[in-house]
Amino acid sequence: MTENKKKMSLTKQIILAMVAGALVGVVINRFAKDVSLIQIWVVDGVFDVLGPLFISSLTMMVVPLVFVSLVGGVTALGDVKSLGRIGIKVIMLYLFTTAVAITIALSVAILFSPGSDFKQGDTVVTYEATEAPSLVAVIKGLVPTNPFKSMAEGNMLQIIVFALLVGIALTMVGKKGEQVIGLFVSLDAVVMTMVNIIMKIAPIGVFCLIAKTFASQGPEIIKPLLSYFGVVIGALLLHAVFTFSCLLKILARLNPITFFRKMRTTAVFAFSTASSNATIPANMKAVEDKLGVKQSVDAFTVPLGATINMDGTAIMQGVATVFIANVYGIDLGLTEYLEVIMTATLASIGTAGVPGVGMIMLAMVLKQVGLPVEGIGLIIGVDRLLDMLRTAVNVMGDAAVSCIVAKSEKSLDIERYDQRDITEV
């Protein structure tokens, strides 16, 4: 048997790790929940150490990858005017897909009416909403006063702005900047090699993350909220399959099936990590190597998308709004639904870079339409599992927009996109 046949693809390794982790977690939750030895050394020991270590190793690569790739991407454009054109296209597409996502979520939720037969009982948990920054505050904070501090804190929008300025300056300085540009090209190769090294341990990290989740919460956590859970999943799948397929086919004349096939590893990886930022390295590599998007485009679209494009989160907000309204017996009219769409779409940018962004955005939406914010406590229990799914949708949305923009800018390698022989990330 050849080495190629012996070696399992990363997609299969991650899927097997997820299944194995879920099974081990459920077994521990069922039969060893009170066994202190297993809880201390396995759940709160091995799982709680290796899982976060894996996420930390990926997060460690985000800032250098985004900064180096974006500087290199801007210099590769060679024309500063094209950067503004790309930026407008990207932001408009991200806002459009978010608005479509929340519209789909509200439509599906209104149709199936989750929460109409839900009994609150003692299940309501008090939720204290964190104050989200206004859109004006976010715009004011775009330019870093100290770019190194922004990098240390992982403030993605400020890092993107600084990287754009560096790239533009290197482009405008001409021959004097060629050596610096060459340095960034070399650094990009080094950073991507580091990403490849980290990805080799992905199955181990995924196993520990999933096992920890199921060992701590157990599968029964979703039983009281099956209607909400099911509607969110249905809306996420509908948006991912229908919206992205239509956009790819209509705007870029690209085969959606090819897109989904080549993005399966990244989607599974995003699902397992539940972190758009942690998935940036894997997503950029897949978008470039598998889909054929040039670095000059994806170095801008993917990091920006991970920061402001929240289709999956918007879907959760739409369904959660209807669910909480039904639970509390509050009727929402057309005006309230339009307010939900507008608030959620604008909040996807206004709350960029804020920890716990999904719940903060939901609190903003609930306040806007007059629903009790403490209703968020009803869905906190299953939010971890749904967070995995909506992260996968967010990441695939970033990749789809990257392909569409790249095609419009003639920066897409069509032969590579259509190539059937795929090398796993």
Image (cartoon, helix red, strand yellow):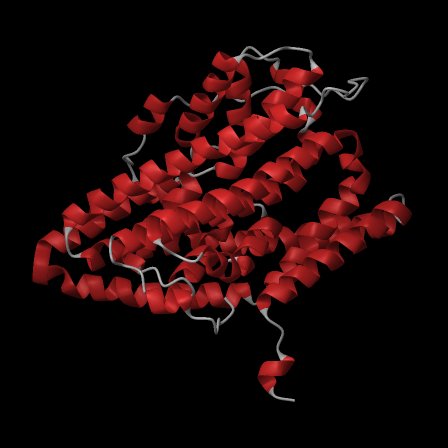
Residue 144 x %, y %:
29, 36
Q: Is residue 10 visible?
A: yes
Q: How many marks?
A: 0
Quadrant position of residue 345: top left
Residue 314 x %, y %:
51, 32
Asked if 415 appears above or below 114 in the picture, the reply is below
- Taking the spot 46% from the left edge, 58% from the top edge, the residue there is 259
Identify the image quadrant of the N terminus: bottom right
Give the side of residue 123 with respect to residue 322, left or right: right
Residue 330 x %, y %:
64, 10
Question: Which of these two is toward me, 30 or 95?
Answer: 95
- Taking the spot 54% from the left edge, 52% from the top edge, the residue there is 56
Give the side of residue 8 with respect to residue 104, left or right: right
Question: Which of these two is toward me, 241 or 58?
Answer: 241
- Taking the spot 41% from the left edge, 57% from the top edge, the residue there is 284
Give the side of residue 75 with respect to residue 219, left or right: left
Residue 250 x %, y %:
37, 47
Q: Residue furthest bottom?
A: 1
- Taking the spot 49% from the left edge, 62% from the top edge, the residue there is 262
Question: Which of these two is toward me, 377 or 81?
Answer: 81
Q: Is residue 275 visible?
A: no
